[in-house]
Amino acid sequence: MNCFNKLFLPCRLVITGANRFVCPSVRFLQSSKHRSLLFPSIDTLQVRTMAQKSIMSFFKITPKKDAEIKKEQPENDTSLEDAEMNEPSPVQNGKAKRTSKRQRLDSSSSESQSPKKENPPTSVTKKKVKRQRIESSESESEPIKSPEKSPAKSTETSPMQSPVKEIKIEKSDNVKTYQSPKTKKAKAKKEGKSENIAKKVIKKEKSPPPKSQSIKKEKSPLKENGKDKTPEKKTKEVKKERESGLVAETEYDPTKSKYHPINDACWAPKQPVPYLALAKTLEAIEAISARLKIVEILSNYFRSVIVLTPEDLLPSVYLCLNQIAPAYHSLELGIAETYLMKAIGQSTGRTLAQMKAAAQKSGDLGAVAEQARSTQRTMFTPPPLKTRAVFNALKEIAGMTGQASVNKKIGKIQSLYVACRFSESRYLIRSLEGKLRIGLAEQSVLQALAQAVATSPPGSDVLDASQGLSAAEFKAIVDEQALIIKTTYCECPNYEMIIPVLLEHGVKALPQHCKLTPGIPLKPMLAHPTKGVHEVLNRFEGTRFTCEYKYDGERAQIHVPKVEKDGEETADLQHASIFSRNQENNTTKYPDILQRLPSLLKAEVSSCVLDCEAVAYDTVNKQILPFQILSTRKRKDASAADIKVQVCVFVFDLLYLNGRALVRQPLEDRRRLLRDNFNEVEGEWQFATAKDCSSMDEVQQFLDDAVKASCEGLMVKTLEGEHARYDIARRSHNWLKLKKDYLEGVGDTIDVVVIGGYHGRGKRRGVYGGFLLACYDNSSEEYQALCKIGTGFSDEDLQTLTKTLEEHVIEAPRNYYRYDTSHAADAWFAPACVWEVRCADLSLSPAHRAALGLVDPERGVSLRFPRFLRVRDDKTPEQATSAQQIAQMYLSQDQVKNSASKPVNFDDFY
């Protein structure tokens, strides 16, 4: 052993420096404790190492990476590490020399930890700082010396070594020694128990106290308060919102049977109505088809608005009707579908092509917008939309004009769209399109408004007036108030005048405050079609009636307001206006009529409203011209000097005279006042040719005279009694129309909407040879396929109609088109063109959807042998023949009259 020590001491420095580059077995043999076990191996390895490498060449070797060293040193080889810990330190000049190696920790667990990184060396090759070893004396029994107790430190370092910060090593009593398997097992068992105890302690420390848990709960989102609460909200604010008791906006439900206008609302009194509340109401209405339930849902919403925020009732009514102003204001949004797609695409990162493809696949741009908005994420959430703000924004969009108006409109739409939540985007885009398509007709809105004010009267503390009344008693009250509201709206179709009076004075005060006024057009009274003269006599048996020529022209309602001059009231001809049958302002279309007004009015007339028919007239031959010639006139901003088609106005009714409404007066009185206060001018102003008849022969003779005078037929009207009043906006049996081209099966022509076209073949190649026609269903706001047509067209008609329809081509049928797939068209058109057609009779058809459910639960009504007559430019698609009228025409046929399963009443508001 002494010989080995004498031989080993001179080489100790070499072995110590190369320790990390030698295999683990060498380090094990360096341990003073195990030297005597494998003496020959140590001697052989030592000689081989000394023979191959010198001291200088050894330090020039690039050290291995930590990953490679780890591989060379398995973690479970603790015996080698123990040996290394007991290695004697080199001695220089009788003193313990400290090497630049990183010090080694005392425990194996500390060994596995990554060493503290020092500043990287400036050399290109990265070098690992050598581990510093703990010094030991030469003798085996000498304890390990800590670096602090070293008497001297070596200042000499190798040029390849980086300077290393001195590491202090604390003394540890748990010096690693060799342990037998039995000892290891006992120690592991003991450590396992301590680990379990430690885990329990850690688990206890991790569990938060009950107080902090409750605070965290209060910061979580609160669904019951209807507001999106973030964890950053203060506890006081959360408590305050909880105490408010509001329903969450996303949970607002107007379909409740026992709806409470305050407790079930999602906004507080005097707060603006959230647009989401209106969207949820429209969504509930869209999901059902029962009219009574629709009225109930809408009335529940109106009740909350009336009680909490009455200022938002007007915007709510307008948005439910998809209007922004009365029809005669001619205020339109003017947003094309392409611009809407562009606005949505720019807001959601989609291209215009992607938006078009999605809209074509879905058929509903509103649904596409809702889906795109639901997947969009914004950095800053805009404030929630309010009903009032949305309505004002739509009015602002409609008022934008000029060259940059399109970009301004798109920007405004984007600002609204990015603030939408849930279904708001669907109905916002549909409102901008101009079609809600939820099956909500105007009469349903008026009925819901009446039910709301009857249940929760404005200005009173009564929230539910139906309590204590039977269902029949309350229904009678609702019907009475609904009649007042509907009649008032017919005389004064302006919600901006009706709603404020309704909220301030109540329903019964409406007739006193909202009267027929010059400048506000009325919805005209309409006539019921008949099949023949015998039906006229059956209807008016025992009643005096008159027959008038039915002129083939355009309905014109002339309004002349009054003005005070020198203390006297005179007619204000400068502000006179002309309105169409659908309340459009046609004043700029007929400047020549306005110039002739002084010759019509007598001196005693200060204000008036006249119901007339503007007809194309040949002033040379004194002859009425067909309607097609009248339709060639310029529709807007016409100049009197450039007008080539002259018109003659045939006046047939007087509705207002000198501040007094005459709509409730019998026709006989109205006609007398008309002839007494107005003048006739040949070729310019004429009274409708009329004759009082009492027999079938007289009616037949007068019908023949009307046909000879280039008229469509006769209008038969009651002269006296209660039924002789002017029923505004009503298709009544008090007026009957008898046309010259009536057939025994059908007593009237039919106005249809063109929704599809079929490519022509042979002679009609290059144009549309056939078309798919539809009627309009007011209740469901749908266009229902009625028939296919291909007759009645000349070659010129097909060329003109094809050119016109090309402007309305769409990529796919609208989702509100109802048709059979066997009749799918080659090209689909937006509902824009209205045609007048004639047919032999009507029949039930399993392949068409017109009036489906009104006559037969599984089959619709179709036209047999339809024939094209003309284009109706004076009618909008919504004013085309309705599905209810189609059903009535079918049931009026002799062959089905006695077998009709479901009568349809048309003597009502339309």
Image (cartoon, rainbow, N blue to C red):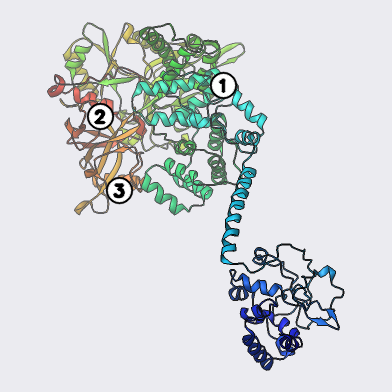
Image quadrant assignment for residue 415: top right
Residue tagged by mark 1? 309
SS for dot 1: loop
Q: Which mark is residue 237?
A: none
Q: Quadrant of the C terminus?
A: top left
Q: Position of residue 428 (x, y in %)?
A: 48, 37
Tell me: residue 101, above or below residue 869.
below
Look at label 1 and name its amino acid. Answer: Thr
Q: Which mark is residue 827?
A: 3
The earlier-in-sequence mark between 3 and 2 is: 3
SS for dot 2: loop
Q: Nearer the viewer, residue 334 or 644?
A: 334
Q: CA distance from mark 3 to mark 1?
A: 48 Å
Q: Nearer the viewer, residue 177 or 896?
A: 177
Quick check: marks 3 and 2 in contact, CB under 8 Å?
no
Residue tagged by mark 2? 851
At x 63%, y 80%, the residue is 37
